Image: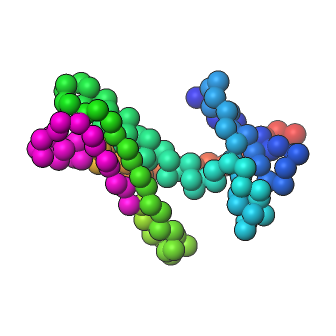
Amino acid sequence: MSIEVRRDRQHKMMHTVQVRQHSLQVDEPASNGGEDLGPTPHDLYDSALASCKALTVLWYAQRKQLPLDDVHVTVERDDSDERRGTYRLRVTLALQGALSDAQRQELLNVAARCPVHKLMTQVTTEISTELAPQ
């Protein structure tokens, strides 16, 4: 799979991200020279975690026929120590439905094992960056 990012030259910093048939805009807030016309790359990173947890919990509850009516995930970012090597994300799950305490705990445990959480915490990511031919 390939993801493409192209600059929108009608704006200061905005880019369009193309993922399969989906597109979205990314930008920076005015404080970083942008126009705040879309989420920042950090926002997308944090959103990937929240989305993965929501989808994983819902998938698991449906598979196990747990009475989960809705799931709402909130991520709070503390990037104050990012330059020193620590990026903190605090995730809160709001689960709605006639769930027992044991089922709620089971879904919390499942959320902690979502693929993006594992990717962010247990996997070594190797990135190579190269120039395209002229």
Q: Give x and y (percent) for residue 120.
A: 42, 52
What are the residue bounds of the magenta stretch?
A: 90-110
Name the residue rendered at 58%, 29% in the picture: 1
Name the residue rendered at 87%, 45% in the picture: 9
Residue 2 is at least partly visible in this image = no
* Total numbered labels placed on residues in the image: 0
Asked if residue 57 is positioned above or below residue 13 in the image, the reply reads: above
Q: Give x and y (percent) for residue 109.
A: 22, 46
Residue 61 is at least partly visible in this image = yes
- Residue 33: which quarter of the image? bottom right
Give left or right: position of 60 versus 100: right
Q: Give x and y (percent) for residue 81.
A: 49, 74
Asked if residue 59 is positioned above or below residue 116 in the image, the reply reads: above
Name the residue rendered at 44%, 60% in the picture: 76
Q: Is 75 colored magenta in this rendering?
A: no
If the image is split into quadrants, where does the C terminus sit? top right
Q: Is 105 colored magenta in this rendering?
A: yes
Give left or right: position of 48 versus 132: left
Q: Give x and y (percent) for residue 71.
A: 34, 40
Give left or right: position of 106 versus 13: left
66 and 24: which is toward the camera: 66
